[in-house]
Each structure stands twice: as C-alpha cells, then as structure tokens.
Image (spheres, grey):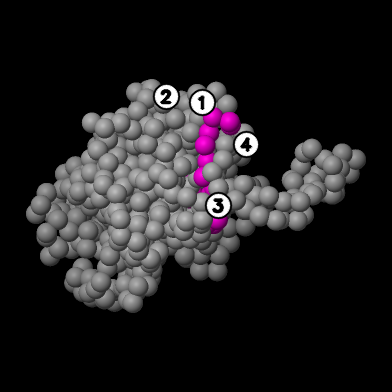
Amino acid sequence: MNDQPTNNLPWAKQLNISSQIVLVILTGIGFLYNCGVLVGLSLADQQDTSKTQEELLSLGASDWKYWDAQEAPDKSWTAVDFDDSKWKSGSAPLGYGERDIETRLSYGKESRRKYPVAYFRRTVELAEVSDLDVMLVSIRADDGAIIYINGEEADRHKILPPEEANGEYIGYQGSVEGVAVPLLLPGRLFKKGTNQIAISVHQRDPTSSDLVLDVGLRGMTAGQAQEYRQADLFPVPNSEGELYVNDAAFYRYAQFLGRQWRAAGKLPTLRKMLSRVREDQPCKLELAPLNTEKKSAAQLYEENRKSILAIFHVGPDDRRSAMGSGAIVSKSGAAITNLHVITSADRGSGEIRMSGDEGYVAVNMDGDYFPVTSILAASARQDVAIVQLGGASFHPLPIVTGTPVGQPVTVISSPHRQMFHLSTGFVTRYAVHALNNQRRVMSISAPLGGGSSGGAVLDECGNITGIAMSVLPLAGEGVSVVADDSDGMLKIRKDADTGLHLNRDHELTISLCVPARTILALTKSP
C-alpha cells in the first residue's frame, strides 16, 4: 500500500520534473523488486536511491535513420555494426497520416497497397551502466513494432501472432492511439558506451491510414524502481479506505517479471510442470488453522491483501495472454486455483492436455509478485490445481468445509483484468455438475466474470469455502443471427444451430464454484 503522497518521488525531484507529470506520462511504468528473487540485485541496490540515470532519449528526438523502401533491408539491419549510411535521416515523430509528423515517410505509389514495414535505427550513449536496472521505454508505434537492442530482440508492441498475421502485415491497432505508452526492458540489454536501437514498425493491412514511430528512454536503478513501484500500482494515495489500483500496471509488471524470471531460469514452462504431475494425486500441505471471528466484507478485503492472488499467463503473445485468480493456502507458498486457469483439460475423461512454453506469474493485492514454479496437484475432473509459488513470507488462508446454504460469502477475484474486485452473496445450493456427474459444485449468488476463475470464496470468518469456477446463464427462448447463403446478409433464425446465438429473455446467472471439500481431497497432512 502507498500511504505517501505521489509527489515525494526522489528521482523526480533530482530530474527537476513534476512527479504528477511523471505519473501521467509514465503511468504504469516501473519495476517491482520482489523479495530479492530477481538475480543480480544486491541489498545495496535496494537501498540506494541517490543515483539517477539520465534521460537517454527524449520523445521527438532527431538523428533517427530510417528505411522506407518497398524491399526490406539486409537481414543484418539490427546489428550494431550494420552500415546504415545510405539510410535517410530525420526527427521523430516519423511516419505519415498524422498531423504532428516531423519526418514524412514514403508508403509507396498506391495508397491502398502501402508498404508493410518501415525500419528505424538510432544510437544512444551510456556513460555508465553499473546502476542501470530497468529501462523505461515510452513508445508510440502504429500499428505495431518489434524492438531490438544491440542486435537482440527486446520486446514486441502490438504485434499479431503468426496465425492471425496477413503475410508481412502483422501489426494491430490497439486501444491507445496518438500517445506514447510504457514498456519495460531489463538493464542487462544495454552496455557502457554506444548502444544500437533498431525498430521495425508494421502495418495491420495495406490500406492502413497512418504509420508512426516516436520513442523515449529513461533508465532507473533498482532502488528508484522499487520506490516508484507503489506509486505506479496504486497511483492515488489510500485515503479513508479508497485504494485506487492501476490495472494496466499490474499486468505490465507480470509480463516484465515473467520474462526476467524466465531468463534467470526461475519460471518453468507449463509443459515442464505438467510432465511431473500425476492426475488426482494428493500433495502434502500444512494448512492454516481456521478463523473463528466473524468480519465484514470490508475487513475481509483489507486484511487478506497478501493472500488473494491474480494469476497471469506469460507467453510470447501478450495480446492474447489470459489471467485468472487464486489464493495462498500454506506458509510454504502453495496456492489454489482452477486447473483451467493454467491449462486445458478434457472434462469428460479428466485427461490433462499438455500445453506449450508459457509460464505463470502470481501477484497479491499488495503488489508482491511470485513465479509459479511447479504444480503440486491437479484434477481435471474437479477443475482444481494446487501450485507452488517462488519467494518467501507467505500469508495463507484457511480452508473450511460445511458452509450451509444461506450463509453469506465474499468473493475477491479479478474479472476481465479488473484487479481484485469484491462481490458478495450467499451459498445457494450444492449439486452435481450438469456436464460432469463426477464433479461437485457449490452455487453462490455473488457475481463472477471471466478472470474470476480460481478466486477465493470466503465465509464470514475469512476461511476459504470454495473457489470460483464458472457462470451458468439461464435464459428463455433464444434466436440465432446467421449469414444467408444466397446474399450473405445477416438474418435472424429462430431454430438455427449455427451462427451467433442470442438469448432473448435472460432470467438468471448462477455462479458455480468448486467446494472446499473437493479442494481438500487433493491435500494430505505432511
């Protein structure tokens, strides 16, 4: 939690920049240093906030080299020693189709068949890198960009996955237009002396109306980044119970730290973790003793900030990255969630499907991040996973069975990336799942949404009585919207089996949860 005013940032004062302006321009930028987990950060790094990296590159900078021809440059164009003497040069913003363009690029002779890619290079000088931990990148790139530092691919911004790309047209137009947005790069990519930045900007399709590139760079030490973190995740000071969270910042840190941990060998792939799991095999866990004091929903929300989790998928395509919810249940760092949050499974056979090279990062409500290092137990039939978190100082929640129908419950989850949303309701019934008679479910009246999966369902004392799983909308007669084969026009069909199905009369949405008894079946005493 951040109890200090946001204008108390030492590094902003040293740079003679208003902290409020910094927070507006660099909203969501920062770096989380969690419990010394990240390799290469010493205690001195954590405590030293006196050093400040200079602004290495400002937005609107000059001396950019660019290539705007139809044919691509040589494959070595990202290299430090590449000869770009024949490239054109100009000041940012570079591109076309926007009013503030300083250097106008060519897109070819036909406005509806524009070149798919423009290429850019620029050098920056670093007098010292020993205290550089994180590089804050402000980038305005339309439609998408791939960033290279000293010949190494560093990040991708608004880039389509291969299966959705239209040939060389692989950029996609995001929700933010006309402004620079933050990216985080590890300081290890940069070296003392001359550093080469190379960026390819990609169009979504040949008729795109504009192409833009503008970039700013600012370095931060580990100490400065750690101090800045709270003002980034929680940009408004906590006052009278109003704690404002920055959803985008929580997501950015998860992606950045996931890549860092993967590079350090601390984020195993899902494929590797699943290869060690035996279906429905219980794991040994020392669970927390039950809470007996009843508390309000507000108290449960505030007092369990270190126990409630959001779980982020970290993969090569962050545009499609999913997320779910969870909770810590042991002092050793075990956490519970739905199996479908981290992988898919055949709900009929119960077979866990092997997946790819993605990893997972969890974060609690205080902004403490943890790598998911292993899967301790899993059940596809019951949709439960118990995972192990890396790190230390865990705060577990107890698990209780026997919460009767009619008892109040509180759910804290992150639906649709709305971080740590609270909803309340009652236990409405226990039943056998309609699609899987081996699965037991608990129904509650508290609202859930996509991303709530795995979220802790708490009783009045703060014990976990279940975890959110899915929603079941109940509705009356529906219709479908389908394309007519004769003319391709969309038409309404009452009894169509295909097309977009629309419920005409929504009646009720039931929130389905995994009951605590099912979760406990995957644990045993050590």
Q: Position of residue 498 (x, y in %)?
A: 77, 38
Residue at which label 1 appears: 350
* The C terminus: image quadrant: top left
- Cα gap from disc 3 to disc 1, whole angstroms: 27 Å
Circle 4: residue type: Ala
Image quadrant of residue 285? top left
| Image depth: mark 4 or mark 2 in front | 4
Q: Residues within 10 Å of mark 2 (few under 14, many from 20)?
A: some
Q: Residues within 10 Å of mark 4 (few under 14, many from 20)?
A: few
The answer to which of marks 3 and 1 sits earlier in the sequence is 1
The answer to which of marks 2 and 1 sits earlier in the sequence is 2
Residue at which label 2 appears: 279
The answer to which of marks 3 and 4 sits earlier in the sequence is 3
| Image depth: mark 3 or mark 4 in front | 3
- Cα gap from disc 4 to disc 1, whole angstroms: 15 Å
Image quadrant of residue 298? bottom left
